[in-house]
Image (cartoon, helix red, strand yellow):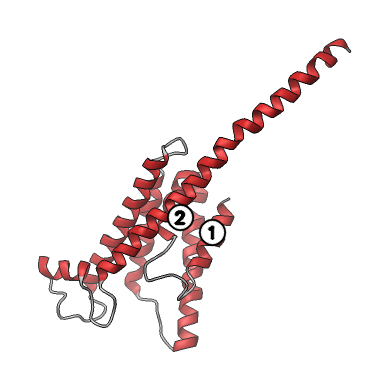
Amino acid sequence: MPIALMIVFALTRWPGLMPPNFSAAYALAFCAGVYFPRRLAWWLPLATLAVTDLIINSYYYFAQGINAFQLYQLVNYGVYAIIIWLGQRFNDRSSWLSLLSGGLLGAVLFYFITNTTAWLFNPFNNPEYTKDFAGWLIALTKGTAGWPQTWEFFRNTLFSGGLFTGLFAGAMKLSEAAEPCEDTEEEAETDEASPEESKA
């Protein structure tokens, strides 16, 4: 399951495949914290993010001559680590609704922290990103001219975080619900065999 989730996640990151900020990354980091063994929950999602970031950056560099990586993007990894930690506050016995809420919270945290970082470092030299509350609100809602407004990024972040968390958690709940049925069938087979074994 962990490897399958990583493959699906890596495929969804290909440039142009999904709308801007519509990603399984937030849900994946959260669900890794919930379901993966403790060590695996940390290194596998972060390593997958790093590898796919290198591939994406190489694509932009060789196809368009653009260096897509910016140093402030290292903050993203810190936020993903926070989301993994958040996921570890839950467990596989948590209700589907609780897990969905946790995934949405992770997406919200990612949006606010990364956009606040962009506002502080001002990578586009946007004169509207003044270092006050008004400039911060512009960074969170309007963004930079020539790009989609940042509230649209927030919408995509929130929707994709909820969608993929719901799908991942729902799939795990369904697989867990199927396990008792299999155990019951095995027990029934054992019970049927036991009289013959006792006669022998």
**Helix, strand, or loop for circle 2?**
helix
Confirm whether residue 196 shows in the render: yes
Whole-percent x and y of residue 138?
Answer: 17, 70
Residue at 69% across, 28% down:
185
The residue pinned by badge 1 equals: 6
Residue at 89% across, 13% down:
200
Query: Relative to 178, does residue 160 appear above or below in the rendering?
Result: below
The residue pinned by badge 2 equals: 28
Q: How many marks?
A: 2
Q: Amino acid at mark 2?
A: Leu
* Residue contact at pointers 2 and 1, CB within 8 angstroms: yes
43 or 6: nearer the eye?
Answer: 6
Image quadrant where residue 114 sits: bottom left
174 or 2: nearer the eye?
Answer: 174
Whole-percent x and y of residue 199?
Answer: 87, 10
**Helix, strand, or loop for circle 1?**
helix
